[in-house]
Image (cartoon, coloured by chain):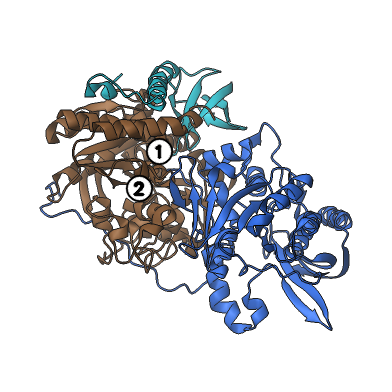
Amino acid sequence: MKYIDEYRDERLARALAAEISRQVTRSWVLMEICGGQTHTLMRYGIDELLPPQIELVHGPGCPVCVTALETIDKAIQLASRPEVTLVSYGDMLRVPGSHSDLFRVKAGGGDVRVVYSPVDALNVARANPERRVVFFAIGFETTAPANAMAAWQARREGLRNFSMLVSHVLVPPAIRLLLNSPGNRVQAFIAPGHVCTVMGYREYEALSREFRVPIVVGGFEPVDLLEAISMLVAQLEAGRAEVENQYVRSVCYEGNLPAQRIMQEVFEVCDRKWRGVGPIPQSGLKLRPEFAAHDAEQVFELADVATEEPAVCISAQVLQGLKKPVDCPAFARTCTPENPLGAPMVSAEGACAAYYQYRRHAVKA
Amino acid sequence: MGNEPKTAPQFSCPVPLPARDQVLLGHGSGGKLTAELIRDVFLPAFRNPILARLDDQAVVNVNGVRLAFTTDSFVVKPLFFPGGDIGSLAVHGTVNDLAMGGAQPLFLSAAFIIEEGLPLATLRQVVASLHEAAAAAGVEVVTGDTKVVEKGSGDGLFINTSGVGVVPEGIQFSADQARPGDRVLLSGSLGDHGIAILAKREGLEFEGPVESDSAPLHTLVASLLAASPTPQSIRCLRDPTRGGLSSALNEIAAQSHVGMEIDERAIPVREEVKGACELLGLDPLYVANEGKLIAIVEAAAGEPLLAAMRHHSLGRQAHIIGTVSDSSPGLVTMRTLFGTTRIVDMLAGDQLPRIC
Amino acid sequence: MCLAVPGKILEVEERDGSRIGRVQFGGITRPAYLDFVPEAVVGDYIMVHVGFAISRVNAEEAARTYELLEEMGLLESEGLGPESSPDTGGDAP
């Protein structure tokens, strides 16, 4: 497949790894933000190719992991109503809420359906006018334009039985939080290539300047990530701190303007609660008042859920890159993908799940 | 609300779910949840050494004759898909379970659970297909059953087939027979069936046809037996159905207390299947197959049996994909295209298409 | 968190005010909404996420940077590393 296969070329990957080894004179801690990038790193064993001085830690780039517990509980509440059809992207189905998850609701008779696209969600609503269809609209900025289109289309059509439970999160505020936290060890970032495809990378310049960290916008194939790492190491070794773009085939400085326009028309920035952390100011998106008729929060009277977060796992530290999944005493023992104790094990994109799937043999017996 | 946190942010954990008290869809996926259900509910109830082997079939001794006996239920949706339908699948699935025990399949039963309202024409079509598949496989449907359930209680049609066959003397295939040094053979490309089904369900359009690989494997097995240097050269046969290659290899690794190392470069996957998997965020290692088998064979038998597979119409794309090792028992690892190593773990439940 | 796949536009049609492409990914074709890439035409490659194109692949930039990578790969395999300054690997387009 063009634009995929050539970025999985082993020869190029090894050449880039060698280049990195040549440049490195001391240890560096790098973070990739996006769960999809973590997935690639684990799947291809990229860390095995890198020199030992490069430490990769994995960021909170998994909206499934960081979706607030209250939001998941609300989705579960809605899905449990007999008149509601809840449509969702696949990964959300296994995320535990306070007492249940969407798979269990489905098992109990709830109408929960997986969709691959917000258009599918609209189609479910059109095909089932007697059902109240709720679309669980989560994601980072990458998914926001498509989700916005669904809301925009629903309003244009007057699709009265369609509403959205929105829980979008934004990347730059999360990076800011990480950089501000006292224990932060991350010295450079690989910015998420598809988020930046939509948003451009202007927002990252402020972060780079303020915190003096190199940031490279990276793609998702092994060669992309290795090239991005190479660019970061070059900056670090030279004492530079700038924003560069590795993923030139998809990302430009301004990003995708039509996509940003629809986002602005439909959503507005709001404070958003991140699972466990609590509210990060201006870190989320919600529907504008003009779309109230399609905002599930307003259409349904959802009981406010009181949730409690016991700190039984170290995912907090994993998500900040302070610890690796294998450092956790529960990893692969009491905490496994089918019995997750923490958010990063839940999602297929979570660092712990990726580690579990691909690297478990590093765990000391 | 606008202050920066003074302590390290605690991206912390959800409350762990209480112990599972109901059956979920994931329990039918062929992955870990299924294994747990078998281990926690079925095995303790039916305690016996034959069942405990957890092979695809049971080999029982009746008056000196070794019979293979198996059962399988078919709940596929949609009922009709490129390359087959629930009827032909019902024959192939059970014939293959028998074949994995080295048996010559002989007789099948066919029990139908029909949802009220199913058009008779549909039923006739399925039955015709089942009959055709049975005839082609050389087995007879000698007994059956019919039940009708109320509308809403089933997916149109469920079929259960049970089968018996005779196992030749000296053949003792089982999942606990793998030994370090053995070779792992795969008879052909991965993911065709699962993708064909998904494509039909999701309306994916393929340039070249992606058809289910649903096929009876007993003649392929017979040619392997004929080419086998000794009766014990073949340790174990498995067809990687739901749960894919990963489940099958993990099950064998667990039962035999061995590790397995496979090579990504050796695993055939059709272009269209690769493309569909990329698009949906699926991994071919976990996608179901209905006309492929894995053979764990002693090292010396690797090449001759590979040749025998390739000689057969159902094994043209066969490859030796790995070796059984004595390190990390129970763990299946894979050399990636990059020469690095990753673990091929069993999934918990169904593979969920990812958007990220 | 963003699985976006590159595909080639084979056909474009208008439906209810939206441009929809018939897009080829390896051996499959799927529809994708082109509302965010008004400049994309038949023959172009686009990145598709949840059924929507989020960018038009910059073929020229991709070719240029890939060529640089390939040169480095060749040098590597011949045992020759880059002779110039450490900045070589970090040029932004």
Q: Residue at x 73, y 47 (%)?
A: B307
Mark 2 burial class by Cα count in 10 Å: few <14, some 14-19, many 20+: many
Q: Amino acid at mark 1?
A: Thr
Q: Amino acid at mark 2?
A: Pro
Q: Colour of chain A?
A: brown
Q: Nearer the viewer, residue A271 or A31?
A: A31
Asked if labels 1 and 2 touch by Cβ distance under 8 angstroms, the answer is yes
In the displayed structure, does residue B254 sit left or right of residue B168?
A: left
Secondary structure beneath label 2 = helix
Q: Chain letter of disc 2?
A: A
- Image check: B4 left or right of A41? left
The correct choice, above or below, for B192 with respect to B59 in the image is above
Residue drawn at x 39%, y 34% as measured from the top left: A14
Q: Which residue is mark 2?
A: A63
Please indicate whether residue A195 sits to the left or right of residue B121 in the image. Answer: left
As rendered, which of A263 and C32 lies closer to the eye?
C32
Chain label for disc 1: A
Q: Position of residue A162 (x, y in %)?
A: 47, 45
Q: Colour of chain B?
A: blue
* Foreground residue among A268 and B95: B95
Q: Which residue is mark 1?
A: A143
Q: Is residue A265 above or below residue B42?
A: above
Q: Secondary structure at mark 1?
A: loop
The quadrant of the picture occupied by the N terminus of chain A is top right
Residue at the image position 22 percent from the left and 20 percent from the top: C85
Residue B246 falls left or right of residue A24: right
Give the chain letter for cyan: C
Q: For the residues marked 2 and 1, what is the alpha-carbon distance in whole angstroms?
A: 11 Å
